Amino acid sequence: MKRYEQFPHTADIGVRVYGASLKELFENAAFSMFDVIADLEGMKSSVEQTIELAAPTPEELLVAWLDELLYHFYTRQIIFFRFEIGELSDTRLRATVYGRPVGANRNRLKTEIKAATYADLVIRKTLEGYQVEIIFDI
């Protein structure tokens, strides 16, 4: 199963994310966002961080997860490229993320993403697992 695919959107970037499980969907959503932001090919980890979040619904948790990762990207200057969801419920998430400081990897940056949005955001159960369409504000 592919992780994600981009789809045309008027002024922003849209991604359709897939996962065999909800954990995989959340991991692939984070990967898709950072794959749009930077060239992740061949990156090796030097930073590891634990992230814990809570939100009222799975969709709000997904946006909180992506926005939290963006916050760390912009404030700590870390390009994340590997995501391991340890615990996930409809309202809580605990994950370990891996990345590298932007520093010498600045030439890998491609597109600035300001935020994940709630525009038409619905997590759907499919025959293969789960799917969600995410619009990133650029």
Image (cartoon, rainbow, N blue to C red):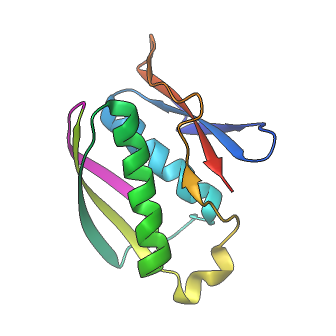
Question: What secondary structure predominates along the stretch shown in magenta?
Answer: strand
25 lies above or below 11: above
Of the pair 103 and 123, the residue shown nearer to us: 123
Residue at position x 52%, y 30% from top? 121
The vertical placement of 110 against 85, above or below, is below
Left or right of 58 on screen, residue 89: left
Q: Viewer-proximal residue, 81 or 76?
A: 76
Rendering quarter of residue 120:
top right
Residue at the far bottom in the pictured view: 104
Identify which residue, 14 or 31, lies in the foreground.
14
Q: Quadrant of residue 37?
A: bottom right
Instruction: Indicate left or right for 52 with 135 as reference.
Output: left
Asked whether the viewer can see residue 80, the reply is: no
12 is higher (above) or lower (below) than 101:
above
Q: Which residue corresponds to the image point at 54% horizontal and 68% vertical from the top-left? A: 42
* Observer-nearest of 44 and 69: 69
Tell me the quarter of the picture where residue 51 sits: bottom left
Q: Is residue 105 magenta?
A: no
Residue 13 x, y percent position in the rendering = 70, 46
Residue 135, horizontal then vertical, whole percent:
62, 41
Q: What residue lies at 79% left-to-right and 46% top-to-bottom?
A: 11
| Magenta region | 80-90
